[in-house]
Image (spheres, rainbow, N blue to C red):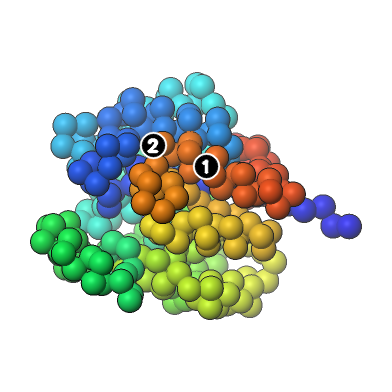
């Protein structure tokens, strides 16, 4: 019987979209981000996806000096794979967004495969629940938010970071992003095996319905054959149900407070490690096992 591949768990510990006012457990300071990353690795994450924040305001920051306050510690205390954001925050220009990944030359960097209207969670059929929240600026202001990543921006990041042998977590928020990945593979700026992170449930992207899920998977299988590793990120309430579907299909999964603040209905996650532990228990309940950082390196062809 074919040996089942271990499941790669990625943990995105803080991100740029959620604000400290939304959860007291959101890591903000360099020490909090370090501890969250080490806790997630301890719980079973093979990869940690990292952003930085201004320790005073909690606002997203791509200051390399801030990353420098947690990266050396994480590397000294863990062999977890480091994945640095090139998405930064939607308001940042491409040079600012890609700064840390270009400077630190990590094994992995995230890369959004296109431009899009970048809302918070999709809320189709549930707007009434959110309507009263609308007076909160962070929800209304996301009505104007565009994340810009043109073909030229993407090519620039692929070229600049790729020349450091950094490989990419390709964030695909919709079907068209898969075709953009196929385009850059054909253009020789992307090398197989690809690491496709399908993002479900963000307002402006594809929703989190099982039909959407299967449509993304079928399209990726058609475009990339077996020469890619699929991972699934469900935003907000989609995190664990779509995560479970992904691992049940022998694929990989991303969790973390960047993507969802919850640990079960109505309960704020007290740590990133809690979410890693929850998805790990699902993986092991299915008779599968989680990948170690070195197994993830082998599977994804990372420079180590
Ligand atoms: C949905 C996630 N916020 C996607 C993300 O992690 C983008 C990035 O950092 O480049
Ligand atoms: Zn991110």
Q: Nearer the viewer, mark 1 or mark 2?
A: 2
Q: State whether residue 112 appears in this view.
A: yes
The residue that mark 1 highlights is: 276
Residue 265 image position (x, y, % from top left): 41, 53
Quadrant hosting residue 202:
bottom left
Element at label 1: helix
Q: Is residue 157 left or right of residue 249?
A: left
Label 2: which secondary element: loop
> Residue at 53% of width from left, 73% of height from top?
210
Q: Callout 2 environment at 10 Å: few (<14), some (14 to 19), or many (20+)?
A: some
- Side of 62 relative to 35 (left or right): left
> At 12% across and 57% down in the image, what residue appears?
137
Residue toward you, 84 or 17: 17
For the C terminus, the image quarter is top right
Q: Is residue 80 visible?
A: no
Q: Which residue is mark 2?
A: 270
Q: Is residue 195 left or right of residue 28?
A: right
Give the position of the N terminus as an image quadrant: bottom right
Percent position of residue 172, x then y:
45, 66
Mark toward the start of the polypeptide (1 vs 2): 2
Q: Is residue 267 left or right of residue 291?
A: left
Q: Residue 147, percent across and down?
A: 27, 64
Q: Which residue is at the front of the view, 47 or 113?
A: 47
């Amino acid at each position: 019987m074919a040996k089942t591949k271990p499941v790669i768990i990625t943990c995105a510990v803080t991100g740029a979209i959620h604000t400290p006012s939304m959860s007291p457990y959101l890591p903000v300071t360099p020490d909090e981000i370090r501890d969250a990353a080490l806790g997630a690795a301890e719980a079973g994450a093979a990869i940690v996806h990292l952003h930085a924040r201004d320790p005073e305001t909690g606002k997203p920051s791509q200051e390399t000096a801030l990353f420098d306050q947690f990266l050396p510690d994480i590397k000294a205390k863990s062999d977890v794979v480091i994945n640095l954001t090139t998405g930064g925050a939607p308001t940042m220009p491409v040079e600012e967004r890609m700064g840390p990944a270009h400077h630190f030359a990590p094994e992995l960097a995230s890369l959004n495969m296109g431009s899009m209207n970048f809302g918070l969670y999709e809320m189709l059929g549930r707007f009434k629940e959110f309507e009263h929240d609308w007076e909160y600026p962070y929800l209304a202001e996301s009505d104007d938010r565009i994340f810009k990543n043109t073909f030229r921006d993407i090519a620039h990041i692929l070229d600049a970071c790729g020349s450091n042998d950094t490989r990419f977590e390709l964030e695909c928020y919709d079907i068209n992003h898969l075709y953009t990945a196929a385009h850059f593979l054909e253009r020789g700026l992307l090398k197989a095996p690809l690491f496709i992170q399908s993002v479900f449930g963000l307002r402006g992207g594809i929703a989190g319905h099982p039909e959407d899920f299967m449509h993304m998977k079928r399209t990726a299988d058609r475009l990339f054959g077996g020469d890619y590793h699929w991972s699934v990120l469900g935003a907000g309430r989609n995190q664990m149900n779509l995560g479970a579907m992904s691992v049940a299909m022998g694929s990989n999964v991303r969790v973390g407070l960047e993507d969802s603040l919850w640990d079960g209905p109505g309960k704020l996650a007290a740590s990133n490690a809690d979410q890693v532990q929850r998805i790990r228990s699902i993986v092991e309940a299915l008779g599968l096992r989680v990948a170690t950082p070195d197994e993830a390196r082998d599977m994804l062809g990372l420079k180590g």
